[in-house]
Amino acid sequence: MKYDMYHELLEQPQSLRETLKAEKSHMKEISEKISQLDKVYLVGCGSSLSTCYSAKDALNMSADINIDVFTGYEFSYHKKIENNNTGLILTSQSGETADTLAALRKANELGLKTITITNEEESTMMKEAQSAVLTRCGRETAILGTKTYVTQLMCLYQILFGAYQSSHSAEVLKQLETVPDIIENLIKTTEEDTKQLAHKFKDEDIFYCMGSGPNYGLAYKFSMTMLMEGALKHACPLYSGEFRHGLIERVEKNVPVIFLESGYPGDELTNRALEFCDNLETKNMVFRMEDYADINNLLSPFVLVVPLEWFTYYLAHYNGEDPGSTRHIGKVRY
């Protein structure tokens, strides 16, 4: 049996290609406007929040800019939002996420420049934002987000690296166009190995996942909306540099720990944590970008997400769960 997530995972390359084709020139226009701003906020929830974390960290590693990330309600409750020559970019698969919509409405009231990235053309956020980028994914059914995740992330990279010139921006934008082909290849080449890995870890109930730089956003997505929502496993994400503040006292022999490594400056701490865990005989899984693709490491989340998606899919499958279904999400309103 193949669940909805399986088919949507396969649709990622085409969703990226169609979004680039339809929205690239529009995103360039948005980049020009963003480049004139003094401050940019990124807002999202769940998988969408993780794209904000990754884009912010990637940009901060290559340009000196004033950029912050908030969840939706944190932004709407915040008492000191800069509104002088400031922009807000919001990401939401549905365009109806209550938290994110509240942030959009506050930003509009304060006079910020507002941009929405969403997958639903008739959504409220699409209509109420001053500018809107529509990802061309078709309807996404699986809760954990595959094709909407990579297209949202691609749009953030396209807009932000297009707005802020740095030593990496031209290369990142050029290589971003190769990402659909890279993901298409990884979908084919990583399924079997991660399927076997998922079978090996199917009886585990808790996973820790760490990464530095843009990989923290991916660790957040992997833990929060893939392992917990999709595979119904306990999971905890953290920046690699925070391993020694808390988790170092909690890891123990045979506990699964997942490392995302891409040669970032912060990965010195990723590898120190890995060495410590090796000595402790935890069950370590290491996903290194260099094993999957040879592109600028700021694009790592696009690369490493594919084997993590397969791992989540089969982890759920081996436990008799549909990785795209939910027990409570959609039924409970806050």
Image: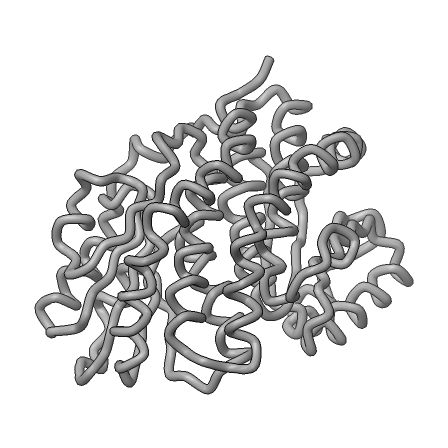
Q: Is residue 319 above or below residue 301?
A: above
* Residue at image location 49% in from the left, 39% down from the top: 146
Identify the residue at the far top of this view: 1
Q: Is residue 241 left or right of residue 141?
A: right
Q: How far from the left and from the top, in percent, is residue 170?
A: 52, 72
Q: How far from the left and from the top, in percent, is residue 286?
A: 78, 54
Q: How far from the left and from the top, in percent, is residue 197?
A: 78, 36
Nearest to the observer: residue 115 or residue 250: 115
Nearest to the observer: residue 71 or residue 151: 151
Q: Quadrant of residue 310?
A: top right
Q: Is residue 236 above or below residue 239?
A: above
Q: Is residue 68 left or right of residue 300?
A: left
Quarter placement of the C terminus: top left
Q: Quadrant of residue 196?
A: top right
* Residue at image location 15% in from the left, 61% down from the top: 130
* Residue at image location 31% in from the left, 42% down from the top: 119
Q: How far from the left and from the top, in percent, is residue 185?
A: 67, 39
* Residue at image location 23% in from the left, 78% down from the top: 86
* Residue 203 makes an appearance in the image: no
